[in-house]
Image (cartoon, grey):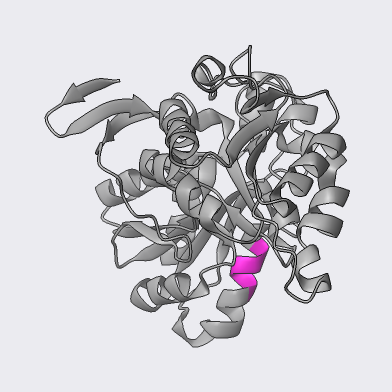
Amino acid sequence: MSTAGTQETTTYREAMREALREAMRSDDRVFLMGEDVGRYGGCFGVSLGLLDEFGPDRVRDTPLSESAFVGAGIGAALAGMRPIVEIMTVNFSLLALDQILNNAATLLHMSGGQLPVPLVIRMTTGAGRQLAAQHSHSLESFYAHIPGIRVLAPATLEDARHMLAPALADPDPVVIFEHGSLYNASGPLAPQAASVDLDHAAVRRPGDAVSLITYGGSLPKVLAAADELAADGVDAEVVDLRTLRPLDAGTVAASVARTHRAVVVDEAWRTGSVAAEVSARLAEESFYELDAPVERVCGAEVPIPYARRLEEAALPQTAGIVAAAHRAVG
C-alpha cells in the first residue's frame, strides 16, 4: 500500500487481506481455514502472508473436501470459535451446500435458539477471467434463497475492507461473495475504521431518470453505463444491493419512487435470479411508481464459455445496460 494524505491506495485483494488481519489480531477466536489459504497464500492471493504472521493453528490448509472443512467450521462455531472458511469458487461450494443449508442455516431454529452458528464463509464468484464453466458461475441466488443466513456481495474497496468485522459479529452464518474480477481493482481507501451497514443497500450515484440496480462484479459496468447515459442527457441513479439476504427492498423502492424506471443488472442467469426477485418486489410494492416495465440485463442461460469473446457475449456488458436504460426511459 502507498499512502497519500489521509488515504491509502490499495486493491480489493489487499483490502480483504487487511480485514482478515485485523479480525485475527483483535480476536483470538478468529481463524481462517480452506484450500491453499496457508502456504500458497490463497488461490487468489487474499491470505498471502497470514500464515507467517499467525501460524498454522490459525491459518489452516484443508484437504480438498468442501463438505468436510465447512462442517468443521460449523463445529468450531458451535464450540465458541469465530471461523472464517474460504471456498475456492462458488461452483465448488455446492459440494458443501448440505452443510450450509441443512446445518449452518437451520441449527439455531431447530434448537429453539440454543445453538447459534457464528460462521463466515468467503468464496469467489463470477466470470470474466476465462476460467470456463466449472469456475465462473454466479450462484448468489442459490444462497439468497435460504432463510437463516446473511448473504453479502462487497463491490467496493470500502465494503471489501469493512464488511468482515460486522459479519463476524453476526450470530448467524454469513456468506460473502467476492467477485473474481474485482481483486485487482485499485483506488483510495481511508485508513481509519469505517462502519458498514449490512442491512441496507447503497446509492452509489444519485439520479432522477432511471434506477440501475445491481451488486458485486457488475457494479463497475453499471457505473460506466451511468457515465455514458449522462453524456446522453440521462441522469441514472445507481443502487448497489450489497446485501442479497435480507434484501433491502426499501432502498430500491425509494430509488424507483424518484426515477419511476428500473433496470436490474445481474451477471447470473435470468431465471430464478436475484434480478428476478428484485423485479418481483418492484411489481408487488412499487407498481404504481413505475412509468415503464422493469428491464433486466442478465447473463445468457448457458454454461459460461471458455473462449474470451463467447464469455464476454454471455455476460452483461456496459453497452447492453445503456441500451436497456434507453428503452426504459423511452
State the image coordinates of residue 119 (x, y, percent, origin top left): 66, 50
Residue placed at 57% from the left, 36% from the top? 179
Residue placed at 58% from the left, 42% from the top? 29
State the image coordinates of residue 156 (x, y, percent, origin top left): 40, 42
- Most foreground residue, 253 or 209: 253
Prevalent SS, magenta region: helix
**Location of residue 316 by image quarter:** top right
State the image coordinates of residue 19 (x, y, percent, origin top left): 44, 36
Residue placed at 59% from the left, 59% from the top? 244
Count the labels in the image: 0
- Most foreground residue, 80 or 261: 80
- Most foreground residue, 236 or 42: 42
Task: Determine whether, in the image, residue 221 is placed left or right of residue 36.
Answer: left
Residue placed at 80% from the left, 64% from the top? 107
**Location of residue 114 by image quarter:** bottom right
- Residue 28 visible in the current orientation: yes
Q: Quadrant of the C terminus?
A: bottom left
| Residue at the outermost left position | 5
> Magenta segment, which residues?
276-280
Q: Is residue 254 above or below residue 2?
A: below
